[in-house]
Image: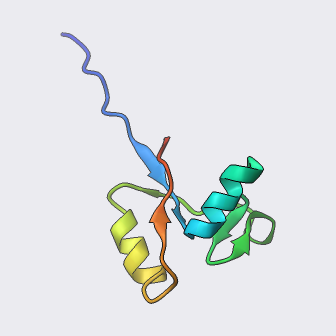
Amino acid sequence: MAQSTPTPRFIFHIANPQAWIHAKQAGEYRISTLGRSLADIGFIHASLDDQVEGVANAIYRGSTPWRHAEPFRA
């Protein structure tokens, strides 16, 4: 029986647009969530594609505009 190729999955981070622009210019991204840094939290929050909408609605509703950063393979 032939093995099927798994569908690639991506992880997403909901990022403040200005923080993302700054990170791309600086060459690194160090925000965990809602202005908390990687150093504060110890990790960067990320979601699979089917989790993004729920996280955005639960955590970021009413916040400044946010965008999905470029996806990374999980």
Note whether 8 is above or below 41 in the view shown: above
Quadrant position of residue 18: bottom right
Residue at (71%, 75%) from the top-left corner? Answer: 36
Quick check: can you spot residue 59? yes
- Depth check: 3 or 45 in front? 45
**Which residue is found at the position 58% from the left and 63% from the top?**
45
Residue sticking out furthest to the left: 1
Say above or below: 10 vs 65. Answer: above
User: How many marks are shown on the rendered structure?
Assistant: 0
Residue 27 x/y as whole percent: 74, 47
Which residue: 74% across, 64% down? Answer: 38
Taking the image as shown, residue 63 lies to the left or right of residue 58, namely right
Farthest residue in the right direction? 39
- If the image is split into quadrants, where does the N terminus sit? top left
Q: How is the image coloured?
A: rainbow
As displayed, is residue 11 above or below residue 17?
A: above
Q: Nearer the viewer, residue 65 or 72?
A: 65
In the picture, residue 23 is in which quadrant?
Answer: bottom right
- Give the x, y percent position of residue 11: 47, 50
Horizontal relation, residue 15 to residue 30: left or right: left
Asked if one can make out residue 44 in the rendered structure from this viewpoint, the answer is no
Residue 73 appears at what percent x and percent y?
48, 38
Residue 9 placement (x, y as % from top left): 39, 41
Give the side of residue 46 with respect to residue 56, left or right.
Answer: right
Q: Is residue 58 above or below residue 17?
A: below
Relative horizontal placement of residue 44, taking residue 52 as reference (left or right): right
